[in-house]
Amino acid sequence: MANPRESELHYPLGEARPGPGELIELAPGVRWLRMGLPFALDHINLWLLRDEIDGTGEAMGTKVQGWTIVDCGVANEATQANWEAIFADQLEGLPVLRVMVTHFHPDHIGLAHWLCQRWSGAVAPGLPAHHECRLWISATDFHLARLASGSTVGMGGETAAAFFASHGLSDPEALTKIRARSSYYPSMVPQVPASFRRLMGGKTLQIGGQSWQCLVGYGHAPEHISLYCAALGLMISGDMVLPRISTNVSVVDVEPEADPLRLYLDSLQRLLSLPTDTLVLPAHGLPFRGLHARIEQLQEHHVERLADVRQACADKPCHAAELLELLFKRKLDLHQTTFAMGESVAHLNSLWLGGQLRRERGADGIYRFSTLATPAAAPKT
């Protein structure tokens, strides 16, 4: 949902944003570009970082200059063409050395395979013909992306439709469309590189002579990696912290008893250790300062939604589908409904697993949640 307290944040570039094929430099060696998306959320911010690797051959002992890409956009002809325009005019004649991906969602990893192939064996001074432009990503998200590119994960198909139906989604047209979306993920991520370098929380990377710390986050994706550079005072936040909308936190059919909301809120709490004036580079929206304020806003938002859900379940047993109007105040299309259902279940699961709600499955196969007279101990996991 939109951020009603956005005025508490500061946008140092105002409403400026890069156009197609353009870059904006945000700090020495850090450039911002933007690609379109085929959803209501119509863009993703991507990043280019000046980088270097050890030379070979005649360049042995020297550093070869190039770029690291952070996040990729979805796999389609328009995004690919935009990347080619960047390569032709914006890289100062230097190659792409590696591709980093914050997490496995299609708008972040979709073109990773093409980009890695495009820049492996690149012809550039000091780069050997067998140079591999490698994908860097967390192990959990790499393996899930490999699995999903051959099927689907939580976004469509028969199991997703059955999962949503078990939480009260009954509209026949919506369920039919969800069943038909079995190729949803592969359509935007048709292939994932066969090999990768592992990113882990706490790992420190050297990129272009600067130290970048990997910050792991949970709840939005299985093992989301944000990148923080203390010397530059900025964080590439991926989807963990967004300025104008709240990050989607969903339960999906492959892990139906998950509590991603608790994982997400715990991850936000850890980010409060960063300086409050950190420049946040989000995947969607505009670069901003006010990290601590935004985290507090997101925490308060979910506390309020949890209270709303608990109250609704105190009035009568509720399933996730009938809470959509309570949690989301706007009309939802099918794409948004799948995310909204996942988020509704996430709030219910968090209260249930936290011992504040009871979950029962009725004769109609639908899970309904009701409040307990006395909060019980959390179920064993």
Image: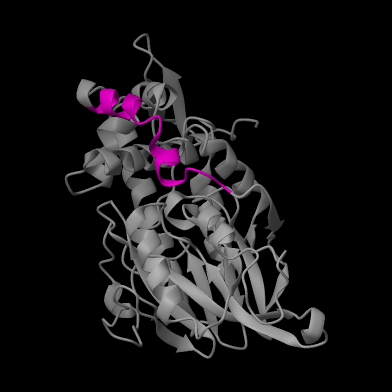
Image: 1 above or below 331: below
Identify which residue, 86 or 154, lies in the foreground: 86
Predominant SS of the magenta segment: helix
Q: Quadrant of the N terminus?
A: bottom left
Which residue: 28% across, 59% down? 42
- The location of residue 19, given as percent across then percent down, is 29, 76
Which residue: 48% across, 35% down? 153
- In the current view of this chain or complex, which residue is farthest to the top? 363
Say how the picture is coloured.
one colour
Residue 273 visible in the displayed image: no
Image: 61 above or below 173: below
For residue 373, what is the image quadrant? top left
Instruction: Say left or right for 74 vs 7.
Output: right
Point out the stretch of residues depicted in magenta. 174-192
- The location of residue 47, given as percent across then percent down, is 48, 73
Question: Does residue 185 show up magenta in the picture?
Answer: yes
Which residue: 30% across, 73% down? 20
Instruction: Say left or right for 285 vs 99.
Output: left
Residue 322 visible in the displayed image: yes
- The location of residue 324, given as percent across then percent down, is 26, 39
Q: Quadrant of the C terminus?
A: top right
Question: Does residue 181 show up magenta in the picture?
Answer: yes
Which residue: 20% across, 49% down? 329
Image: 317 above or below 77: above
- The location of residue 34, given as percent across then percent down, is 36, 70
For residue 137, what is the image quadrant? bottom right
Image: 176 above or below 378: above
Q: How many marks?
A: 0
Identify which residue, 92 or 326, lies in the foreground: 92
- In the current view of this chain or complex, which residue is farthest to the left? 331
